[in-house]
Image (spheres, grey):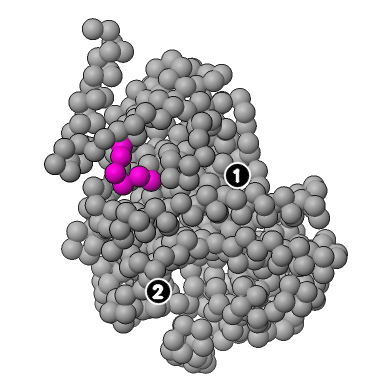
């Protein structure tokens, strides 16, 4: 037998060892792809893999922040294990402090000696008392510890232009002003140099229940006072629509009129379900995962509408908040905080499908932030007391991390079924990264990809999978779902690998 034949036979044997059994192996169907190496889309900005952390439930308090006097191992008050995991994830950008919390957050409450900080009420998330022990300096230090760029969501709903203007001066002005000197006294002589500034959040709802026209006027007013204090290269972000609300975008852009201080426009898009996270059925699984086609449609249509007002694409489109939002379990929320949900294998597949969408539309997007980092909604980490685990979605991001900074290339799949194979590919130099996601719970997929304009010299692949769509990493079994090696054949003009049902696989291929 030839070397190539031996490799294929070995691949089949290895795959049989990892394919789940349901009495017998799940059936598999062939999926043919054509990877057009020369057909470049755009660079996949690392910011498309961004994260979001809000003062909600136990995301901050008890999740990331445990306090310096906590018996839980910590670094300067930050949960030590969380810092290690988040740093390893190489998070490019982290959005804070909200969410709905942002438009009732007054930044001065969170600076200065902790003992003197006021106790306020979180009106959006349960009316619990917020002691403001985690404020601007604590957030900036978190970003330093994990290597993320900070993104501040400013208060428009209950704040004033002066308040947001002063926060910008406090954070970014080098020295010599009263506010910059106050920052120095509070322990940070060097400016924070925050680039990303959100001017409000969900102003169509919790951010003030505004109309597009009234919000456009507020954006013009607030951004006027930010345009110089935020520094060279600042990126001011307006509140875009909830999902694909084209009417909000059209009316906002018409009312905005002058757009010189608008750099980003942020849409929110959740994939919701009335099913509890660990009780999905094949039907509810299909309903949720099929919705990622709506996400891609929203990006295409929102970008096309923005292009009518901004043909040079100086305004970047963001997906500020995205991810799965399942039905909450009252007992879990009581124990772990608001909007806590488990993250099963199905959620990892959803995360990878979302990232594949962003890669395929890399020319239309500036940033995307999954909600949220720890203990809330589509989290990458879960904590309980002194325990901290990586969820299946953490590992989905890990598998797709290799795409960051590479150029996305077009892949022909020959179909448009929203529940068919989800694919993205990118190249840099002599390396190709190919991610394939099988959203089907009942069928494997044999991927046969041809390379147009190049030749493969071998490679490696890893995959994420569990035979149970509701399986998840738990505090008792934190490593049930972790990446494993997947047999790969990458030779000359073809790449072959076989995906079990409901799985995510990334191949890194050497090119001639």
Magenta segment boundaries in residue numbering? 439-444
Dot 2 or dot 1: first in sequence order is: 2
Kindly identify the residue that appears in the image at 61 percent across and 40 percent down. Answer: 43
Q: Position of residue 455 (x, y in %)?
A: 48, 17
Residue sitting nearer the eye, 291 or 236: 291
Mark 1 crowdedness (10 Å alpha carbons): few <14, some 14-19, many ≥20: some
Mark 2 crowdedness (10 Å alpha carbons): few <14, some 14-19, many ≥20: many
Is the stretch drawn in magenta largely helix, strand or loop?
A: loop
Q: Position of residue 487 (x, y in %)?
A: 29, 29
Kindly identify the residue that appears in the image at 54 percent across and 83 percent down. Answer: 110
According to the image, label 2 marks what residue? 339
According to the image, label 1 marks what residue? 361
Kindly identify the residue that appears in the image at 35 percent across and 50 percent down. Answer: 395
Question: Going by the image, does 334 lie left or right of 123?
Answer: left
Q: Secondary structure at mark 2?
A: loop
Q: Position of residue 328 (x, y in %)?
A: 36, 73
């Amino acid at each position: 037998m030839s070397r190539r034949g031996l490799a294929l036979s070995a691949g089949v044997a290895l795959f049989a060892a990892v394919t789940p059994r349901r009495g017998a192996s799940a059936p598999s169907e062939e999926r043919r792809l054509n990877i057009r190496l020369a057909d470049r889309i755009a660079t996949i900005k690392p910011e498309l893999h961004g994260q979001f952390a809000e003062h909600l439930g136990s995301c901050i308090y008890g999740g990331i922040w445990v306090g310096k006097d906590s018996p839980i191992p910590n670094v300067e008050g930050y949960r030590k294990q969380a810092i290690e995991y988040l740093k390893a994830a190489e998070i490019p950008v982290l959005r804070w402090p909200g969410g709905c919390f942002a438009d009732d957050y007054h930044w001065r409450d969170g600076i200065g000696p902790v003992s003197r900080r006021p106790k306020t009420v979180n009106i959006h998330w349960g009316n619990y008392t917020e002691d403001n022990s985690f404020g601007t300096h604590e957030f900036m230090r978190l970003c330093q510890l994990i290597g993320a760029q900070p993104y501040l969501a400013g208060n428009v709903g209950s704040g004033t232009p002066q308040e947001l203007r002063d926060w910008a001066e406090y954070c970014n002005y080098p020295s010599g002003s009263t506010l910059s000197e106050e920052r120095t006294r509070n322990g940070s002589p060097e400016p924070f140099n925050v680039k990303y500034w959100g001017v409000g959040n969900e102003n169509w709802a919790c951010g003030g229940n505004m109309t597009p026209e009234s919000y456009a006027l507020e954006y013009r007013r607030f951004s006027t006072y930010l345009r110089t204090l935020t520094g060279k290269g600042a990126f001011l972000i307006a509140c875009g629509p909830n999902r694909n609300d084209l009417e909000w975008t059209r009316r906002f852009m018409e009312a905005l009129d002058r757009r010189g201080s608008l750099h980003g426009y942020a849409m929110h898009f959740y994939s919701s379900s009335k099913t509890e996270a660990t009780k999905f059925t094949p039907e509810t699984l299909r309903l949720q995962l099929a919705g990622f086609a709506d996400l891609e449609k929203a990006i295409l249509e929102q970008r096309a509408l923005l292009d009518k007002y901004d043909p040079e694409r100086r305004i970047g489109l963001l997906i500020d908040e995205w991810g799965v939002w399942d039905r909450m379990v009252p007992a879990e929320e009581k124990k772990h905080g608001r909007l806590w949900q488990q993250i099963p294998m199905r959620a990892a597949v959803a995360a990878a499908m979302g990232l594949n969408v962003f890669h395929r539309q890399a020319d239309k997007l500036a940033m995307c932030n999954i909600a949220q980092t720890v203990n809330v909604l589509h989290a990458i980490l879960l904590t309980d007391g002194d325990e901290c685990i990586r969820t299946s979605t953490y590992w989905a991001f890990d598998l797709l991390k290799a795409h960051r900074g590479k150029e996305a290339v077009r892949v022909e799949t020959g179909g448009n079924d929203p529940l068919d194979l989800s694919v993205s590919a990118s190249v840099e130099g002599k390396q190709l990264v190919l991610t394939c996601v099988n959203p089907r719970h009942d069928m494997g997929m044999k991927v046969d990809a041809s390379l147009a304009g190049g030749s493969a010299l071998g490679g490696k692949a890893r995959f994420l999978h569990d035979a149970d769509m509701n399986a998840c990493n738990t505090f008792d079994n934190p490593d049930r779902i972790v990446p494993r090696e997947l047999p790969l054949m990458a030779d000359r003009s073809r790449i072959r690998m076989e995906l079990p049902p409901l799985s995510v696989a990334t191949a890194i291929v050497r090119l001639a």
